[in-house]
């Protein structure tokens, strides 16, 4: 369950990244949508890092590859 949440947050971060790029090209810097996309992206990344840290702390995630 934790791994699925982490993957979902990473996908949402990528969507936010590409939406920010789209807004940067489309709006040419005239609106604050790029800044909003950046705020969302930073928040999602912080939440992802917090979930990973909690997963290691609680023992739900183990370092290494596989399984």
Image: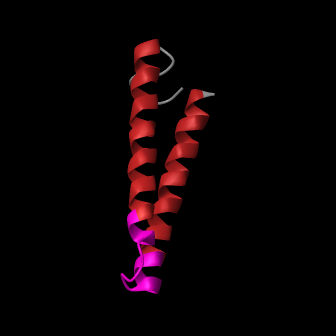
Q: Is residue 9 visible?
A: yes
Residue 57 in the image: x percent, y percent?
Answer: 40, 15
Q: Is residue 65 visible?
A: no
Q: Residue at the right extreme?
A: 1
> As rendered, which of 35 and 67 lies closer to the eye?
35
Instruction: Indicate whether 4 appears above or below 62.
Output: below
Q: Residue at x 46, y 76 (%)?
A: 23
Residue 58 in the image: x percent, y percent?
Answer: 46, 13
**Res 39 → quadrant:** bottom left
**Res 46 → quadrant:** top left
Instruction: Indicate whether 35 appears above or below 55.
Output: below
Count of marks overlaid on the render = 0
Residue 31 in the image: x percent, y percent?
Answer: 42, 78
Q: Residue at x 38, y 50 (%)?
A: 42
Q: Residue at the front extreme?
A: 31
Q: Residue at x 45, y 70 (%)?
A: 33
> As rendered, which of 54 and 4 lies closer to the eye?
54
Instruction: Indicate whether 66 appears above or below 22.
Output: above
| Quarter of the rendering occupied by the C terminus | top right
- 13 left or right of 63 in image: right
Instruction: Indicate whether 43 appears above or below 21.
Output: above
Q: Is residue 37 magenta?
A: no
Residue 18 in the image: x percent, y percent?
Answer: 48, 68
Q: Residue at x 55, y 42 (%)?
A: 7
Q: Which residues are magenta?
A: 23-35
Query: What is the magenta segment's predominant secondary structure?
Result: helix
Q: Is residue 31 magenta?
A: yes
């Amino acid at each position: 369950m934790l791994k699925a949440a982490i993957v979902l947050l990473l996908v949402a971060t990528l969507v936010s990244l590409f939406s920010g790029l789209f807004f940067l090209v489309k709006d040419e810097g005239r609106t604050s949508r790029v800044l909003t996309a950046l705020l969302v992206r930073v928040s999602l990344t912080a939440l992802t890092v917090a979930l990973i840290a909690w997963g290691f702390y609680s023992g739900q995630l183990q370092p290494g590859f596989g399984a």
